[in-house]
Amino acid sequence: MQLAFPVVMADEHGEASPNPLIPAIYDIVWSAVVFAIVLVFFLWLVPKLNKALDARRDAIEGALERAEAAEAKAKASVEENAAILAEARAEASQIREKARAEGAQILAELKVAAQEEADRVGATARAQIEAERQAAVQSLRQEVGVLALDLSEKVVGESLDEQRAAGIVDRFLADLEAEEAGRR
Amino acid sequence: MGLTGAEEPIFGLNRIMLIRFLAVAVMMLILWLAVRNMRIVPTRFQAGAEFLLGFVRQNVIIDTLGEKDGRRFMPVLMAMFFGILAMNITGIIPGLNIAGTSVIGMPLVLALVAYVLFIYAGLKKHPGAFLKNSLFPSGVPLPIYIIVTPIEFLSTFVLRPVTLALRLLMNMVAGHLLLVLCFAATHFFFLSMLAYGDFLGLLGIGTLAFGLAFTLFEILVAVLQAYVFTYLAAVYIQLALADEH
């Protein structure tokens, strides 16, 4: 069996036991050599390791950034779509409102026009009726006068002077009208 | 040195020296195979090696020293960790059975490296002010420096390397002695007692179980001591780099 301190074994040979904390020269030498070899190895390995880990971090960060960018883009396009939709809705409602207003206005205009037409027709009709009435009154007055004269000629049996006759008729009619007015 | 006379060999190789070479050679081979062509998407083997390398890189070095200084001191601290780990773990490998760090030379050289590193880091970062900050911490009343300065000198410039070296050495030596005790006792109980009909030799079952338990424990100790040594070296460098002490 190997022991940790071969130097301790020296006791058996009657030699002074060396202090295990005081190193032998070859121990220091080979320790330094071993560490130098390991150090050189890690001077090669560490940059390689760092490079690989950095590359991986960059790759992961790049992928994350790309994913974030895609997400932001998708979000933006969704928002854009929503905005377009809202705009279209607003526009549609605006158009509807406008159409409704226009319809109402047209209706009102038509109403006014119809009213005017009706008024015009009514006025015309009234004017016509008035004219006809006036004509009728005129002709009636004439006819009634003639009839009355005829009648009175027949009654009196002689022809009356034309001018006097007209005066009589007018007087008679005025009396009639006055009488009628007095009755009311 | 010089105690055993002029015939002491300068390049004498013994079993433990050879174990050191073997341990670091195997460690370097494994890591070389793992990282010789590293890919962004790692193979299983690469991922395993990267777990360990990444642990030391991030948790021991960068978390202590920060990204920038961490990268400066990374190769030497990595060499420390994996060198110590490889040479510690030989303590439980059948056929080797002793840690390469269980003679004073290796812990001493490593502690010396850590010592030089943190003094170099301090002197480079704060030329002139480093020694003053280390030995005469600010905010102390003037007379107290009579006590504080020797204590600071002792703790920073003497005890740090000594404790680094001795902690590692003694852990490995103690582990080796424990395993030797357990397995030597097992050997004795089984082959010198039980083989001759003495049933007290059955105690060997217990010592064997303890030996196995301590073997597992020594794996933990091997990793832990590599971690502690490297972490403390990183902390000492960090303290030397810090602006205020």
Image (spheres, helix red, strand yellow):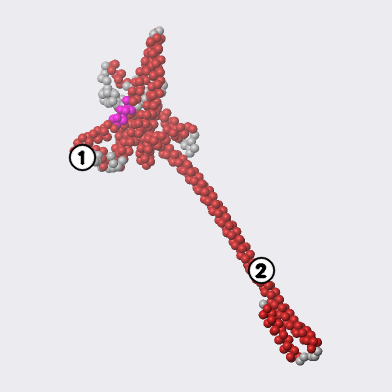
**Residue at point 28%, 17% (across, down):** A11
- Chain that bears disc 2: A
* Mark toward the viewer: 2 or 1: 2
Please tell me whether residue A82 is drawn above or below residue A112 in the rendered image: above
**Residue at point 69%, 81% (across, down):** A179
Q: How crowded is mark 2: few (under 14 residues within 10 Å), some or many (20 or more)?
A: few
Q: Is mark 1 on a helix, strand or loop?
A: loop
Q: Position of residue B86 (x, y in %)?
A: 39, 28
- The label number, if any, that marks residue A114 in the structure image: 2
**What segment carries the magenta color?**
B161-170
Relative horizontal placement of residue B159, taking residue B28 as reference (left or right): left
**Residue at point 39%, 16% (across, down):** B206
In the image shown, does B151 or B43 lie closer to the viewer? B151
Q: Where is residue A15 in the image (x, y as percent from the top left)?
A: 26, 18
Relative horizontal placement of residue A64, taking residue A17 as reference (left or right): right
* Residue A14 sits in quarter: top left
Q: Where is residue B43 in the image (x, y as percent from the top left)?
A: 49, 34
Q: Name the residue under label 1.
A: B141
Q: Please indicate, yes or no, whether residue B224 appears anywhere in the rendered image.
A: yes
Q: Position of residue B155 (x, y in %)?
A: 26, 33
Distance from the alpha carbon under mark 2 to that under mark 1? 112 Å
- Chain that bears disc 1: B
Relative horizontal placement of residue B134, taking residue A35 as reference (left or right): left
Q: Is mark 2 on a helix, strand or loop?
A: helix
- Residue placed furthest toward the left: B143
